[in-house]
Amino acid sequence: MRYSQLLIPTVKEVPADAEIPSHRLMIRAGFIRKVASGTYTYLPLGLKMLQKAAQIVREEMNASGAQEIAMPILQPIELWHKTGRDTDYGETMCKFTDRHGRENVLAPTAEEVVTTLVAADVRSYKQLPLNLYQIQTKFRDEFRPRFGVLRSREFLMKDAYSFDTDIAGLEKTYKRMYEAYCRIFDRCGVKYVVVEAESGPIGGSASHEFMAPCPTGEDIIVHTEDYSYAANIEKAEVDSSTGVSPVSGCTGETPVLPTEEVHTPGAGTIEEVCDFLKTKPAEMIKTIVYWERDNTVMDVYKKTLTKFQTHSGQIEGLRDKFEELRGKSEPIISEIEASPNMEASPDWDKFVSQSKELVLKSFPPKSTAFYESGIEFIKARDRLANTAVMVLVRGNHNINESKLNRALGKNVEIAPEQVVQLVSRAKIGFAGPVGMWDKMDKFVKANKLIIDHSIAAMPVGVAGANKTDYHVRNVVPGRDFPLEGDNVIVADIRNAVEGDTHDGKTLQFSRGIEIGHVFKLGTKYSEKLGATYLDENGSAKPCVMGCYGIGINRIIAAAIEVGNDKNGCILPPAIAPFEVEVMILNNDSAEVVAEAERIYNELAEAGADVLLDDRDTRAGAKFKDADLIGIPLRVVVGERGLKEGNVEIKRRTDDKPTMVATKEAVAQTLKILSELKSAIRNPQSAI
RNA sequence: CGGGGCGUGGCGCAGUUUGGCUAGCGUGCUUGACUGGGGGUCAAGAGGUCGCAGGUUCAAAUCCUGUCGCCCCGACCA
């Protein structure tokens, strides 16, 4: 193709919002333009790269026995109701209501659709195994789209779904997909490592991610030095004995002191407390409150709180009066504000009778409504507090929510401020396990305390005191809070950190971009959607499924993220917008133009993907543009060289061009090109 | 969703604190001349309802209120 006729709007300056190299370069090289947050137009070169990558994916998928289909982007929400994933995916789904009031989603993925298809049209084991895929636009309303096309709201994904008769069949299909993925990324010339990922319903190593190693990647890869073990940090398992560094001042020989409450004003974060008490994060028992989100309970809580406050505000001088009465009797407001679980505590009856008596006596006219709203409020608070889960990890560790959810057997998320305050009876930053049990028996019965191994192994530590601006020293796990019991779980619930080991080998950390994911699904979808087949004996069984995704855009972005220099993109020919460029250096020289055209035509006839830079512009601009858009191989035809009967050939990665006789030019170019194309990188040597 | 920041020719920015000239600069774009091997020089041009809406004022890019959009950090993410 001719450069002069293509829209390749290269720019020197980029919008300030492009931060990482691939994003900046894709804009500078005229591959993409942003339309809105997380949505991009692909210009001719960008689209061409996408299509080249997609074609490689298509060829390898077909070679592995998969069949291409096209499913609709528009899906009815009902399908998602059937699998319950409408709530699982939640806000990430792009939804809209059509003119008939039907709710629709723009496909973030297609398990439901493809499984429904198979449920309707596959009957017999004779039709299995089956592997269906498509290369199609997906929509995800990301919380925060970023890094250009690496995390966008609309992207091109190859998604494949396999159906087998049994686990053994799935294993075979999975392996075939895994191998196809290796070939795909090899052919694309993108370096990758394969890591264990958060596993599905089958358990074990049921999921692998293909990661392009890269410092700006969003995913953290945890691996041993020799890569005999590599996993996403969400998955990485650590030896339970690690992370238990000795705690200063307590080696086990030192007698353990009783707990001691210390005043730590304003020190709510681990760092602040450590500064204040001169301790290390590893000696802190970090307490994070999670909850099973329940918006109804939260709404009731908020409403009853408002009502209660309104009523208490209606009685003039009520608060002052209680302050005055504080010494004489249990002060109602402070009790209510202090305890979320009064209803459950032994003091409850006493509280009810005392407060009623007190209120009625002091403020007869309006007190009934106040009293009743107070009771309602306390009940609502109780229910809210009972959604809580208290999670303990060391101060230098981070909670891994995937592991946490697995250990709990349910999904929880970080609790909102109200819940934390209810549970700890203090501002955020001062929650702790000590003492909660004496005062809150119902809390222990109804909620869970989940403790990381490394906490259980701690001899002594510092924890929040459940009192604003106070912490507790000399906390001994097992002595000052339980390590076993009905609602106490000790498990691996944290992210790996430096120094951890896996099977005794030290773990290292690096970053990567997830470009592919293979996943064993099992029968989760086939059961819910009725994708069954009849086996040899005529009995119906659910298909055993797998799913396999590749982010096509991410292949491109990852390639650029990894392959670039100050002059622009350095791309493998398999996905570069063009494999080779012939540059007409002196447009006013008929010989130069003729010779360049000749070489260009012959290269094109030989099957090369070739671009002719025929623009009547300065040489410098052409050189800059060729480098910027990442042309792997460049042939320059100029007056100077032509006088000697030569043209210049230069790889993008060469420092200097090589002079080649004009009659050798085409053959030589094709030779170098085939060398470049066959230079498949060994994934393990990529690290 | 929480915290922070930004919206001024295509792009990058100044001007806003302290209201007041015809709203500037760089780059890009158009035309011409000179040039011609790593984004050239000179000259002449085109291009802006200062995100939008309302308000204050003799006067608003500038002050006030509201609103929309975008970016960063965090939280979230088969």
Image (cartoon, coloured by chain):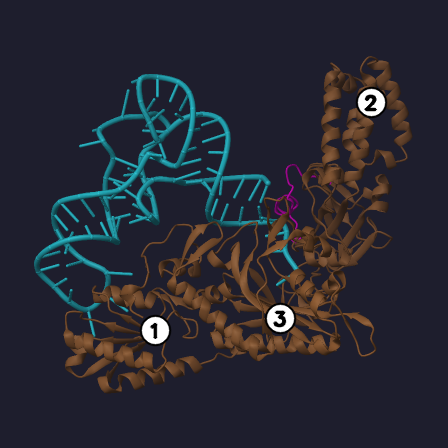
Instruction: Please report the bounds of the magenta region as a residue range.
Output: A262-281
Q: Are labels 2 and 1 assigned to the same chain?
A: yes
Q: Can you see residue A394?
A: no
Q: How far apart are marks 2 and 3 (CA)?
A: 64 Å
Assess whether mark 3 and mark 1 are in contact (beta carbons under 8 angstroms): no
Q: The brown chain is which one?
A: A
Q: Which residue in the structure is indicated by mark 2? A: A371
Q: Which residue in the structure is indicated by mark 3? A: A132
Which is more foreground, mark 2 or mark 3? 3
Q: Which chain is cyan?
A: B
Kind of element beneath mark 3:
strand
Q: In this view, does A573 lie above or below A306?
A: below
Amino acid type at mark 2? Tyr
Q: How crowded is mark 1: few (under 14 residues within 10 Å), some or many (20 or more)?
A: many
Q: Which residue in the structure is indicated by mark 1? A: A652
Q: How crowded is mark 3: few (under 14 residues within 10 Å), some or many (20 or more)?
A: many
Q: In this view, does A206 lie above or below A93?
A: below
Q: Give the camera-side residue of B48 and A631.
A: B48
Q: How far apart are marks 1 and 3 (CA)?
A: 39 Å
Reply yes or no: does residue A687 show up in magenta.
Answer: no
Q: Is residue A115 above or below residue A599?
A: above
Residue at 90% x, 35% y is: A346
Amino acid type at mark 3? Leu
Residue A103 is labelled as none
Kind of element beneath mark 1:
loop
Q: In which quarter of the image is residue A345?
A: top right
